């Protein structure tokens, strides 16, 4: 179609999210968003065809949540085979080196921590509501 065929007053096609699926304003509370950090992960996965080698390193990003005990909760697949994990707080450009302390593949959860106390300043741990029995 030629651009000359489009009328200037023609409405643009846009997709909109129904109001019923909009995120409630209390979820977007800046205090809660401050408990979410971005992870920068470098990983080198094993090469199962040639066990004496590893696959080329690759980088990815993911998110983590601040929880009690100066720990971060994230998905296990995000930090599996990691060689380096760095975390950045919301609104900051400084990245801090994180350390994986536990990975559970079955639940796809991992716990991280970091030794730098400066990272934890201004962060508030999220609290879990009642967790159903499994």
Image (cartoon, grey):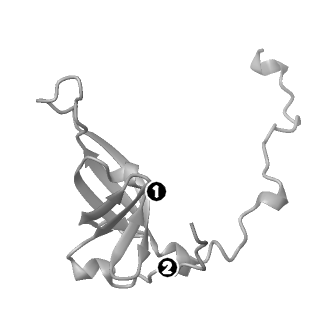
Above or below, 103 against 56 in this view is below
Q: Residues within 10 Å of mark 1 (few under 14, many from 20)?
A: few
Label located before the other in sequence (2 or 1): 1
Q: Position of residue 6 (x, y in %)?
A: 83, 25
Determine the residue positioned at 34% across, 66% down.
111
> Of helix, strand and loop, which one carries label 1?
loop
Callouts 2 and 1 close, C-beta under 8 Å: no
Find the distance from the CA under tag 2 to the CA under tag 1: 19 Å
**Left or right relative to 8: residue 84:** left
Above or below, 121 against 35 in this view is below
Determine the residue positioned at 26% across, 44% down.
43
Number of the label disc, if any, that sits on residue 126 = 2
Nearer to us of marks 2 and 1 is: 1
Quadrant position of the C terminus in the picture: bottom right
Q: Which of the 4 image quarters holds residue 55?
A: top left
As drawn, the residue found furthest toward the top would be: 1
Q: Nearer the viewer, residue 112 or 57?
A: 112
Q: Position of residue 121 (x, y in %)?
A: 33, 84
As drawn, the residue found furthest toward the left would be: 52
Q: Nearer the viewer, residue 126 or 59?
A: 126
Above or below, 38 against 28 in this view is above
Report which residue position mark 1 lands on: 107
Q: Which of the 4 image quarters holds residue 116?
A: bottom left
Above or below, 130 against 24 in this view is below
Quadrant position of the N terminus in the picture: top right
């Amino acid at each position: 179609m030629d651009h000359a065929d489009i009328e200037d007053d023609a409405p643009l096609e846009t997709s909109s999210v129904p109001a019923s699926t909009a995120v409630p304003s209390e979820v977007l509370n800046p205090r809660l968003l401050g408990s979410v950090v971005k992870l920068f992960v470098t990983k080198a996965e094993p090469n199962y065809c040639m066990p004496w080698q590893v696959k080329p390193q690759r980088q990815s990003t993911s998110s983590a949540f601040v929880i009690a005990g100066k720990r971060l909760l994230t998905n296990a697949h995000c930090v599996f085979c990691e060689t380096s994990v760095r975390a950045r707080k919301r609104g900051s450009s400084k990245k801090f080196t994180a350390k994986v302390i536990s990975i559970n593949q079955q639940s796809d959860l991992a716990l991280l921590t970091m030794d730098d106390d400066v990272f934890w300043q201004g962060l508030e741990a999220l609290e879990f509501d009642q967790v159903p029995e499994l």
